[in-house]
Amino acid sequence: MTGKYALALEEARRGLDRQATDFANLRTRTTSLLGIGGTLVSVLGGLAIRSGGELRCTTYAAILSFVALALLSVWVLAPRKVTFTHDPKAIITAIDVPDAEEDDAVAHLAEQMGTQYDDNKKVLDRLAQLYTIAASVFVIEVFTLLLDLRGR
């Protein structure tokens, strides 16, 4: 595609493609973190309380950490309104305007994609923050599980 807005459209598409990849990666990392956290609490927690071992403060702290990790993970993984494509009907409507030039339609599409990028960025930034908190809670979970195992 050539024209004075072609570069803007190309960059808008690349931005949305990058966001889609980032979103998918974030969901994959969150799923992995939850799986590893669940496995650790099962294995290390099971070792700590095997043979009728007493429940300590660290046992409860580890369980609470895992619950917090699970809740944060579910929050990150819950469906969100993010848009990585543009409505074909809107494109056709922009093109079908009387006396519209191709550059006008391309500029309109690039602007719409820019708006989608900005809207998505707010959602993705918040989810990334939640993931960071979940990863921190995971570290707390591991630490408390190891403390709980110590001396048993």
Image (tube, grey):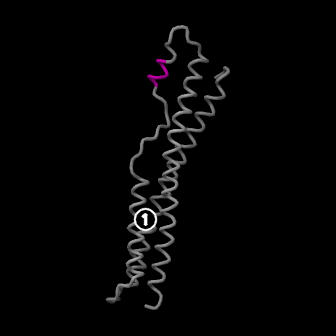
Is residue 92 shown above or below 67?
above
Q: In which quarter of the image is the C terminus?
A: bottom left
Residue 35: image location, x then y, percent = 43, 65
Range drawn in magenta: 88-93
Residue 131 falls within the magenta-colored stretch: no
Residue 90 falls within the magenta-colored stretch: yes
Q: Is mark 1 on a helix, strand or loop?
A: helix
Taking the view exactly as shown, the residue that stands out farthest to the top is: 99
- Relative to the observer, which residue lies in front, 26 or 39? 26
Q: In which quarter of the image is the N terminus?
A: top right
Amino acid at the residue labelled 1? Leu
Taking the view exactly as shown, the residue that stands out farthest to the bottom is: 151
- The residue singled out by tag 1 in the image is 69
Taking the view exactly as shown, the residue that stands out farthest to the left is: 52
- Determine the main secondary structure of the stretch shown in magenta: helix
Is residue 1 shown above or below 139?
above
How packed mark 1 is, by other alpha carbons closer than 10 Å (few <14, some 14-19, many 20 or more), is many
Residue 76: image location, x then y, percent = 44, 54
Residue at x-position 48% and y-position 83%: 147
Q: How many labels does the image show?
A: 1
Is residue 108 shown above or below 151?
above
Q: In which quarter of the image is residue 6?
A: top right
98 displayed left or right of 73 = right
Residue at x-position 44% and y-position 69%: 37
Residue 109: image location, x then y, percent = 55, 25
- Relative to the observer, which residue lies in front, 118 or 3? 118
